[in-house]
Amino acid sequence: MPQLGSYTLLAPVLAASVWALVVLIAELFSVGRRHLAVAWLTVVALVSTAILTGSLAERGVFGGAIALDGLTVYASVLACALAALSVVMAMDYLPTTGIKGGEYYPLILFAVAGVVVMAAATDLIVMFLGLETMSMAVYVLAGIWKSEGKSNEAAVKYFLLGAFASAFMLYGIALVYGATGSTVLSEVAAGAADAVPGPSRTLLLIGASMLLVGFGFKVAAVPFHLWTPDVYEGAPTSVTVFMATVVKLGAFAAVIRTMLVGLEAVGGDLWLALWLGAAATMTVGNFVALRQKDLKRMLAYSSIAHSGYLLIGLAAGTPEAGQAMLFYLAVYGVMNLGAFGVAMALSEDGATEQRISDLAGIGHSRPVLAIAMTICMLSLVGIPPLGGFLGKLYLFKAALDAGLTGLVVVAVLNSVVSAFYYLGVVRTMYFERGNENPQPLAPRPFIWAALALSVVAVVLLGVMPGAVLSGASVALEGVLLGP
C-alpha cells in the first residue's frame, strides 16, 4: 500500500468540501431563509479557504492521488478569489431575478471544491471525480432560475453535452490505463516516455486525444463549443460569470498538469491537432462574435476565442508557456468579472437577454459604469498598459520561443479582429444616442464593490504584475505527479 502522508496535504480539498457542507446546513436552518447571511458565510468560506491554502508550506502527495504543490495553491487561491467576487455580485443580482433557490451558495462551494480537486489531482480517476463534482453543481446552477425557460434550456443542453464529453474523457482514461498500466500521472508519464512506436503508443495517443476532447468541452474549444452561447445566455448572469472564470480555470489547471507535465512525452505527436485546435478556436470565436447583438452571447464567443489563445500555450508545451497560461487565466478572470459586473449592474430585472444596443448613451448617463466597461473591453483586446496586454504578450512570447511563429501570427490577426466588436461596445456607449432621461438604477452596493475590485485588478495586473507572475512561475516549478 502507498504511504498516505500528512493529512495537511488534503487541507485545500477538505476546507472547500467542509465549508460547502457547513453553508448547506446553515442555509437549511436559517430563520426565514436569510440568503444574504448565507451569502456572506460563503464569502467567508472562500476567503478562509484561500488564506489557509496560501499559508501552507508543506508539499507532497497524499496517497498518490492528491498533490499539494505550487499549481494546487495557485489555482485554488485564484478560484476562491474569483468565486468570492462572483458571490458578492450575486448578492445584489439574484433578488432582481426572483430566484429563491437557497441551494445557490452551497452549489458554488461544491463547484469550487471540484475545481480544487481537479487542480490537485495526480490520478486521472480522481481528476475525473473532481470534474464531475464541479460539473454536477454547475448543471444545477445553470437551471436554477426555474421560472425562466432559457435557464431550463441552458441546464438541459449543458447536462446532455457535458455527459457526452465525460464519456469521452472516461474512455480516454481507460485507454491510457491500457497503454501504461496506471492512472497515476507519474506512472503514466514514465510509461509514455518508454513507449515505442507500436500498438501501445497508438493506444496511448488515442487515450490522450480523448482526454483532450473532455477538457475541450469544459474550456469551450472548437469544435466542442456549441453549448457555450446558449448556456451563457440562458443561465443567470451571476452563474455565467462563474462558469466563464472559475470553471475555465479548473479545466485548464487540470490540462496543464495532465498534458504539459504528465503526458509531455506524447505532446509532440499531438502538436498539429493542438495547433489547429488553437487556430480554429480563436478564429471561430472572434468571427462569430462580430455578428452578435446580445451582450452575453458576444461575451460567450469572446470566451471561446480566449480559450483559443490559452491553447497556444498547450501547443507550445513548455514550462514558460504553462506559466503564461496561468497568468493569463488570472487576467482573463478579472476582465470577465468586470464586463459581466457592468451587465448585472445595468440589468433591472435580471433578464437573460441584454442587447449591446441597450448600452447606448451610458457614457453620458452612467459614466462610471461606462469607464469600467471600457477598461475591460480594452483589456480584452490587449491594449497596454492593461492586464490583457501583458497576458497576451507573455503567452505569445512563449509560443515564439517554442517555434510557433505561424500560430502567433494567427493569434495577432485574431486580436485585431476582436478589436472590432470590443471597441464596438465602447462606440455604442459613447457615440450612440440612448435614453436621454434614464431611470435611476436601484442601489446595488455589492455589485459596485466587486466591480471596482475587478477593474482595479485589471489595471494592476498590467502595471504591477510581479506578484501574480511570480506565483504563476512558482506554480510550475516542481509540479508533483504522484509517488
Image: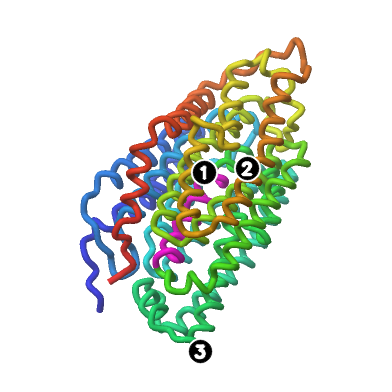
User: Going by the picture, which residue comes out furthest to the top?
Assistant: 437
Q: From mark 1 to mark 2, how far is it between C-alphas?
A: 9 Å
Q: Nearer the viewer, residue 100 or 440?
A: 440
Q: Callout 2: helix, strand or loop?
A: helix
- Could you say where residue 123 lies in the image, as x and y percent from the top left? 39, 69
Q: From mark 1 to mark 3, how far is it between C-alphas?
A: 39 Å
| Quadrant location of the N terminus in the rendered image | bottom left
User: Going by the picture, which residue comes out furthest to the bottom?
Assistant: 199
**Quarter of image, res 436:** top right
At a point 73% along the width and 25% down the height, the residue shown is 428
The answer to the question of whether label 2 and label 3 lie on touching residues, with beta carbons closer than 8 A, is no
Q: Main secondary structure of the magenta part?
A: helix
Residue 258 covered by magenta stretch: yes
Type of residue at label 1? Lys
Instruction: Return the residue at label 1.
Output: 392
Q: From mark 2 to mark 3, how far is it between C-alphas?
A: 41 Å
What is the magenta range?
242-261
| Left or right position of 393 against 70 | right
Q: Which mark is residue 415?
A: 2
Q: Is residue 207 above or below residue 378?
A: below
At a point 55% along the width and 66% down the height, the residue shown is 212
Local crowd at mark 3 within 10 Å, few (<14), some, or many (≥20)?
few
Instruction: Nearest to the eye among marks 2 and 3: give it.
Output: 2
- Could you say where residue 86 lies in the image, as x and y percent from the top left? 51, 37
Q: Nearer the viewer, residue 194 or 345?
A: 194
Instruction: Return the residue at label 3.
Output: 198
The answer to the question of whether label 1 and label 2 lie on touching residues, with beta carbons closer than 8 A, is yes
The answer to the question of whether label 1 and label 3 lie on touching residues, with beta carbons closer than 8 A, is no
Q: Nearer the viewer, residue 47 or 120?
A: 120
At a point 52% along the width and 74% down the height, the residue shown is 269
Whichever of callouts 1 and 2 sits on the residue coming sooner in the sequence is: 1
Type of residue at label 2? Ser
